[in-house]
Amino acid sequence: MLSSVPERKMLYVRSLLLVAWLTLIMSLFWDPYSAGLTGPVKETSPLSVAHHAVIVQGVELRVEPYALGTRVFWTIVIPIMPLFLIVFGHEAWRRVCPLSLASQIPGLVGLQR
């Protein structure tokens, strides 16, 4: 399926995936923006938390806004990778793997031994 796609288009796909991976990894360490999407002020956002506190074993826990980087990584990205391998196979993953592009960057910019 992906073997008929030209290598130039796959380079664009891999570079887009590499930028997305690096952005996601950066958001795991520093993410000042997505916590605003989960705050109670954003009532139109499907990610907003409720205004009230939750009672757990008699203790009131306040609901706080949270960053989305870890939730996206552990609940979307990690489960999709094995599913992608099962559905499309190892050869398709080799064509779109962002790490393969990261290892080829020195050769693409002309920095070789």
Image (tube, helix red, strand yellow):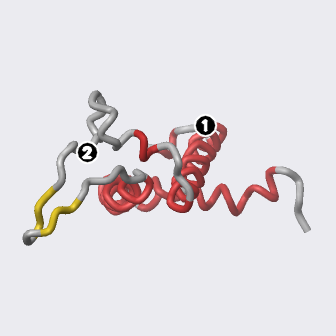
Q: Residue 57 carries which label?
A: none
Query: Is residue 13 toward the left or the right of residue 35 in the image?
Result: right
Residue 41, horizontal then vertical, whole percent: 33, 35
Dot 1 amino acid type: Lys
Residue 60: % across, % down: 16, 63
Front disc: 1 or 2: 2
Q: Quadrant of the C terminus?
A: bottom right
Check the image and name the residue furthest to the top.
44
Q: In this view, does 113 lie above or below 16?
A: below
For residue 49, the mark is: 2
Which numbered disc, 1 or 2, marks the residue that appears first in the sequence?
Answer: 1
> Where is residue 48, by image quadrant?
top left
Vertical position of residue 42 compared to residue 1: above or below: above
Q: Quadrant of residue 77?
A: bottom left
Residue 104 horizontal/vertical position (percent):
73, 58
| Residue 55 in sight in this render | yes
What percent of the width, then of the height, locates residue 52? 18, 47
